[in-house]
Structures are given as structure tokens and as C-alpha cells.
Image: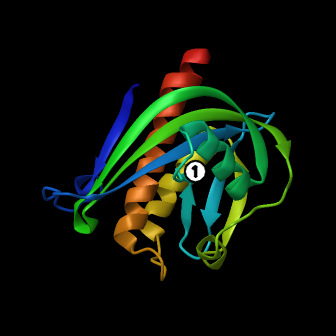
């Protein structure tokens, strides 16, 4: 299992302090590909946030089950998992929070066009978008300085999320796409 990145407060220009007994979370994320090589991005319009598809692993689920469920919820797509890419560690000292996200590459096998979003995701104006990987990375990076907090997520957490996902996408482009070309 390869460490893709370690994301901390310092990645968003904040000072990092040691975390003791943090709240922990295990999550899964995917580079979700359609038949044209575009990737799915969840755009939370009301926050100007662009993020990869994925979320937390529920009790009793393994990583792949969580990935299939999260992908169906956030994208409306049934998938075939192509490969495991690695993992990302997040340390949010201001929240005393640690998250380990397992990253996969997956292919759409069926698009139901029906998202099953949480109330939070709906209220944040979530919509599914498809971009080339390079376009997605550019849009994520451009959105960073225009992020808006929501009643569910402050600017600090949103900056960490966008930094995490743009780092994952950059890794995918450099290590997978560019090696295959």
C-alpha cells in the first residue's frame, strides 16, 4: 500500500499542532472514469468546492463495499473497480481529527442518473460533473481561493478536502496517465 500524500494544516498555510487521541475516520475515494476517459467530480455549488467521489466506510463494510455504495450515492453509477492506487492521510489539528482515505480507480458499468445525496450534500448544491482529469485538476486548483464555508463545513475543512483531492488527482495524472502515454 503506497502512501500518496500526508495532508496537514501546513498544506493550507496554517500552523500544525500535535494531535492527541484524535477522532478517526476511514474513507474511500475513487477516480471514477466513464467510457471517454472523463472523471466524475462532485461540485458543491454553494461552497464552490470540487471533490472526488467518495466518503466514509460504514461499520460492517469492507473498503470495496463502501466504495461501491458511496459511488452509487454520489454519482448514480455502478462501477467496476479497476485498481487500488494508494492511500492519503489527513491530519486536521484544529479539529483533532485524523482520516485515512483509500484511493481506487474505477470504471462506470452503468449510469442510473439518479444521485442519492445526503441532506447536507443537497443543501450545499451538489451536482455531478464530468471532466478530463487535467480539466478537473485545473478547476479544483482554481476553486481553492474562491471557496465558501457552509453551515456544515468551515473554510478550514473545505480547503483540506480540496487540497487532498487535487493532490490525489495530480498523483493519478502523473503516475498513471502519463506512464500509459
Where is residue 101 shown, x and y percent of the image?
44, 44
Q: Is residue 27 visible?
A: yes
Position of residue 22 relative to residue 120, above or below, is above
The residue at the point 54 percent across, 31 percent down is 173
Q: Quadrant of the N terminus?
A: top left
Q: Quadrant of the C terminus?
A: top right
The residue most toward the top is 180
Where is residue 102 shown, x and y percent of the image?
47, 39
Position of residue 177 relative to residue 70, above or below, is above
Residue toward you, 34 or 81:
81
Q: Tag 1: Cα neighbours inside 10 Å, few (<14), some, or many (≥20)?
A: many
The residue at the point 13 percent across, 56 percent down is 18
Q: Is residue 52 visible?
A: no
The residue at the point 59 percent across, 25 percent down is 177
Displayed quadrant of residue 80: top right
Displayed quadrant of residue 116: bottom right
The residue most toward the front is 60
Where is residue 159 shown, x and y percent of the image?
39, 62
Left or right position of 22 against 72 = left
**What residue does disc 1 label?**
54
Left or right position of 108 against 56 = right
Amino acid at each position: 500500500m503506497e502512501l500518496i500524500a500526508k495532508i496537514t494544516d501546513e498544506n493550507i498555510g496554517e500552523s500544525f499542532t500535535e494531535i492527541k487521541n484524535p477522532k478517526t475516520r476511514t474513507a474511500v475515494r475513487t477516480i471514477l472514469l466513464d467510457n471517454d476517459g472523463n472523471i466524475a467530480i462532485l461540485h458543491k455549488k454553494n461552497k464552490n468546492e470540487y471533490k472526488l467521489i467518495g466518503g466514509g466506510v460504514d461499520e460492517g463494510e469492507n473498503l470495496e463495499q463502501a466504495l461501491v455504495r458511496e459511488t452509487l450515492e454520489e454519482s448514480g453509477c455502478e462501477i467496476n473497480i479497476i485498481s487500488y492506487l494508494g492511500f492519503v492521510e489527513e491530519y486536521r489539528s484544529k479539529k483533532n481529527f485524523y482520516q485515512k482515505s483509500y484511493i481506487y480507480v474505477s470504471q462506470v458499468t452503468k449510469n442510473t442518473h439518479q444521485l442519492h445525496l445526503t441532506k447536507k450534500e443537497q443543501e450545499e448544491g451538489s451536482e455531478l460533473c464530468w471532466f478530463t482529469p487535467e480539466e478537473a485538476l485545473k478547476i479544483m486548483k482554481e476553486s481553492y481561493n474562491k471557496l465558501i464555508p457552509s453551515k456544515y463545513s468551515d473554510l478550514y475543512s473545505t480547503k483540506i478536502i480540496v487540497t487532498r483531492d487535487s493532490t490525489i488527482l495530480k498523483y493519478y495524472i502523473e503516475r498513471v496517465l502519463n506512464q500509459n502515454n
